[in-house]
Image (spheres, rainbow, N blue to C red):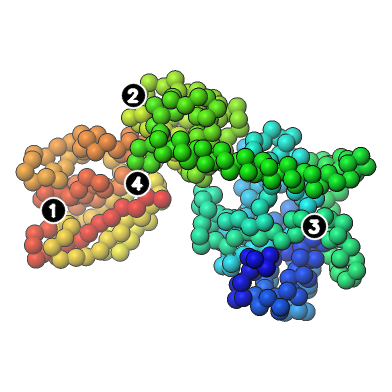
Amino acid sequence: MRGQIEPGNHLIVALSGGMDSVVLLDLLATLSVKMQFTLSTVHVNHGISANADKWVKFCRSLCRTPGIPLKIARPEISREPGVSLEAAARDARYQVFGKLKADYVVLAQHLDDQAETLLLQLLRGAGAKGLGAMPVVRKQSSGIRNQASDSAPRILRPLLEMPRSEIEAYARKNQLHWITDESNADVSFDRNFLRHEIFPLLEKRYPSYRTTFLRTSRHLAEASGLLDELAEADSSSCSVSGKLQVEGLRKLDFPRAKNLLRHTLAQQGATLPSTVKLEEILRQLLSSRPDAKLHIAFGNTEIRCFRGMLHVRPLSSHAATEWQLAWHGEKQLLIADPGGTINFSQRKSAGINLSKLMEKPVTIRLRQGGERLRPDCRRPRRSLKNLLQEAALPPWEREALPLLFSGEHLVWVPGIGIDCDFQVAAGEPGLVVKWQQG
């Protein structure tokens, strides 16, 4: 930990009120003076337990005496089909952690947690990445598609090599007080079943199983890192303009192509499908024709193919076709469906002729069909359909483009241009319009 923390850093302890996090807070409160870092806490109240409000009161009381700041977070838990309540609550916690302002969020996970996680993942049939050891430090998501973020605080786990028995001994020696989550005794939860039924038996025969499991997890983490390096090398030879080519996948043997596809999905922040589903997706891609308009949806993600290239996108409903938004001079408009913003800035001799644009009501809406545009004054007016096809825009992106109209006259299309009749002349006040999706 001394190699990670610098004077002036801000650490936030994830304080559940249980023994592990109470010990962690006690240790860090002492170290904060010696190492000169700022310490605060966050308590995530999921509202699942009938005792949740009592836990909040306990954490407030615990932090009040030493004067340690405490933030109470009450996230909404959203469960996708097939996702357990425990997993959904965990995702909600990490969403909270990713939005905190600090250098580190410090978790009290320890050596026993490592062992439990390894065996749980093994029983679920996880691959090398899932079986790899939890790192002491890692970057985390800021909450957007699970992408790693430089702005989000890093996760720090300083107790990972300390067994639960040592943590408990410290708590009792220092006469610490903590709360006990009643669900910890419920063996209907897989982790509790392993903790109370399996590991006591395992320890009788293999007393050093915790450190052995940790060593195994670290070996698998190394293997996972090498697989990622292989995927990066394959990606560089199988991609064009950052998009994976189906033809490139066909040049690899099946396990290697599967490794590359898994890596690509992870890089895009997708919730990874099961191995069976991933292999099914890969088979569909490998057997698709070059002109196929393949569309595969799973979890929070969809894969589309256009001109032999993979497009990995967040899964969304089909764009509405009847909404209309008026523009009254705002600098920015939020477009809820398909999701994005349009930015407007006035600039002389650039963009749209502002005075001509405002002669009629200015509106924004999606394609209805039959629209025509003349972005090049040297060429005749053409159908928007043909212009979008020539621009090689995938069909789903064409349907999601917000179009700017003056009355019923199409003025501007993102990526295509401004209609000749509305292009600003030198010296005239103009309006520069930019579309940013996502």
Q: 65 or 310: which is nearer to us?
A: 310
**Left-right relation of 342 to 27:** left
N-terminal-most mark, 2 or 4: 2
Q: Which residue is mark 3?
A: 162
| Residue at the (84%, 61%) spot, across then down | 167
Mark 4, residue position: 323
Q: CA distance from mark 1 to mark 2?
A: 37 Å
Q: Earlier in the sequence, mark 3 or mark 2?
A: 3
Q: Residue furthest left?
A: 378
Q: Amino acid at mark 3?
A: Met
Residue 331 location (% of width, % of height): 30, 64
Q: Which residue is mark 2?
A: 291
Q: Which mark is residue 422?
A: 1
- How crowded pointer 1 is (Cα within 10 Å; few <14, some 14-19, many 20+) is rated as many
Label 4 crowd bin: few (<14), some (14–19), many (20+), radius 10 Å: few
Where's residue 336, x and y in %? 41, 51
Res. 14 image quadrant: bottom right
Which mark is in front, 3 or 4?
A: 3
Q: Sequence-wise, which precedes: disc 3 or disc 1?
A: 3
Separation (CA) of disc 1 from disc 4: 24 Å
- Badge nearest the viewer, 3 or 1: 3
Answer yes or no: do the residues labelled 3 and 1 have beta carbons within 8 Å?
no
Would you say the residues marked 3 and 2 are in contact, meaning their CB atoms lie under 8 Å apart?
A: no
In this orientation, does residue 36 appear?
yes
Could you say which is closer to the camera, residue 161 or residue 421? 161
Give the CA distance from mark 3 to mark 4.
58 Å
Which amino acid, mark 4? Trp
Identify the amino acid type marked 2. Asp
Q: Identify the residue at image location x=77%, y=43%.
A: 213
Marks 3 and 1, how far apart in space?
Answer: 69 Å
- Looking at the image, which residue is at 58% across and 62% down? 153
On screen, residue 194 above or below 54: above
